[in-house]
Every structure is written in C-alpha cells, then in structure tokens.
Amino acid sequence: MTAIRLLLVDDDPLVRAGLSFMLGGAGDIEIVGEAADGDEAETLVARTRPDVVLMDIRMPTVDGLTATERLRARADAPQIVVLTTFHADEQVLRALRAGAAGFVLKDTPPAEILDAVRKVAAGDPVLSPAVTRQLMAHAAGTAADTRRSRARARITVLGEREREVAVAVGRGLSNAEIAARLFMSVPTVKTHVSRILAKLDLNNRVQIALLAYDAGLLDVPEEDPAAGRGGHGPRN
C-alpha cells in the first residue's frame, strides 16, 4: 500500500513537531515536509508533491486561506485539511469555498486527525452537515442573500436527477446512501457527482454541499422518495 504523502503547515514549531510525532508514526503516512507559512507551503508542494496538506489558517506573511486558494488552483492540487481553533469562523468557511476538503480543530484527538487525513486522501470530505449549517449561519446576513441568488442562478445548469444528488450530498449522504435513497446504482451516483462538479466548476463534495446550502436546497424538508416512485427498484 502506497503511503499518504502529508505536508504540515503551521507557524508554531511546537505544533508542527507534535503533529509530526503523532502522524509520522502511522504506517500509511509519510511526512514529506513542514512549512511555517503559506509561501513556504507553496514552494514545498511544488517540490514534494504531497497528497494532503494539513494547513493552519492564521500565519504571518502568507496565511492559510491565501495558500489554500493558490494551491487548489494548481493543476496538481493536493487535498487540504484546515487546522483551526474555532468551529465557526469566516476564514474556515472561505477556505472550504476555495476547495479545502474539510477542517479539524487543533485539539482534536490524534486518531481523528489521522482519520481526517485518510478520508481526504481517499476523496471523502471531512465535514458534517451540522458543521456546515453552523458555518453558514455564522456568515448569515446581506452577503448570504447575495450568495443565495448567485447560487440559485448557478444550479440552473443541473438536470433534475443531478439536483437531487446535489441535495443528497448537501445532507451528508455517502454514495451508497444516495443510491439507496434515489433508487440508483452507486456507479450512476458517482457519474452524477462527477457531472455536477464539472458543470459547476467545483472540485469536491464539500463545495457541492455549500452551494446546495447557499441555494436554499437544504431548506426543504426531506421526503421519502419511495412515496413518489411507487417503491420501484433502482433506476438511473
């Protein structure tokens, strides 16, 4: 099994040392470098090509938000997990919108940080629907109204089934759960997710969830899809 290449980015050398000690001992994790700010992180990403970057937000010179935006714009962009001390923070939300796959708190137990790194390396987000709602509520206000109108305009490119899949992703369902809920095969769900990402120019499921939230798609109460389909079996 190929080890997950991990880059640590934090301006505190003690935090970096602690993370390196905690995560470097895992057999499937290879620490390929450590950076003290976003500028150094960009240089190391180009040199070491990590699979995942564990990124602090508040750093001098180039902060984690700016670094996340720059790294996710790369053709060979690594997955990024944001390190933060706050659950609800505008900068965390901006990092997620920029393409970060999720975030973990700095006081998160080592086993959970390891799990987060493994999940994003496998293409799975690290963000629960409850946390998404908390972050969105934190950013509510006039700007939220603007986001809603823009988000609704963007989702008009989605077909009916793609829209249903986007809502399910926003509710935090896995591909298997979406397949069961919408009477699709798992490969069909994956195809829909890929098309949604391409049509909306997004790069991960977290961004789909945030856009679905912005557009108000998650405001509608969940319904039993079997009620409208007569309980028939899978269909694409």
Image (cartoon, rainbow, N blue to C red):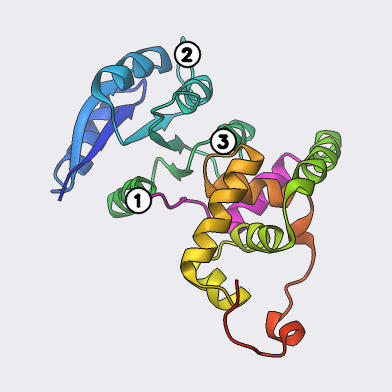
Amino acid carrying label 2: it is Val
In the picture, which quadrant includes the C terminus?
A: bottom right
Judge whether residue 206 is colored magenta. Answer: no
Q: Tag on residue 122? A: 1
Identify the secondary structure beneath mark 1. Answer: loop
Q: Is residue 2 left or right of residue 164?
A: left
Q: Is the Cβ of the residue at disc 1 closer than 8 Å to that at disc 2?
A: no
At x 62%, y 51%, the residue is 209
Which tag, 3 or 1, sits closer to the chain's start?
3
In this rendered view, identify the residue nearer to me: 212 or 60. 212
Q: What stretch is highlighted in magenta?
A: 122-140
Q: Residue 62 carries which label?
A: 2
Q: Which of marks 3 and 2 is nearer the N terminus?
A: 2
- Is 186 placed above or below 156 here? below
Q: Distance between the residues labelled 3 and 2?
A: 15 Å
In the rendered image, residue 192, in percent from the top left (x then y), is placed at 58, 57
Give the image location of residue 126, x and y in percent.
46, 51
Seen from the viewer's position, the closer of residues 122 and 15 is: 122
Q: For the residue marked with disc 3, what is the amino acid?
A: Val
Which residue lies most toward the front here?
A: 236
Q: In this view, does 214 lie above or below 91?
A: below
Tell me what residue is drawn at x 79 percent, y 65 percent. Answer: 220
**Visible residue check, residue 174:** no
Q: Of circles 1 and 2, which is in front?
A: 1
- Residue carrying label 3: 92
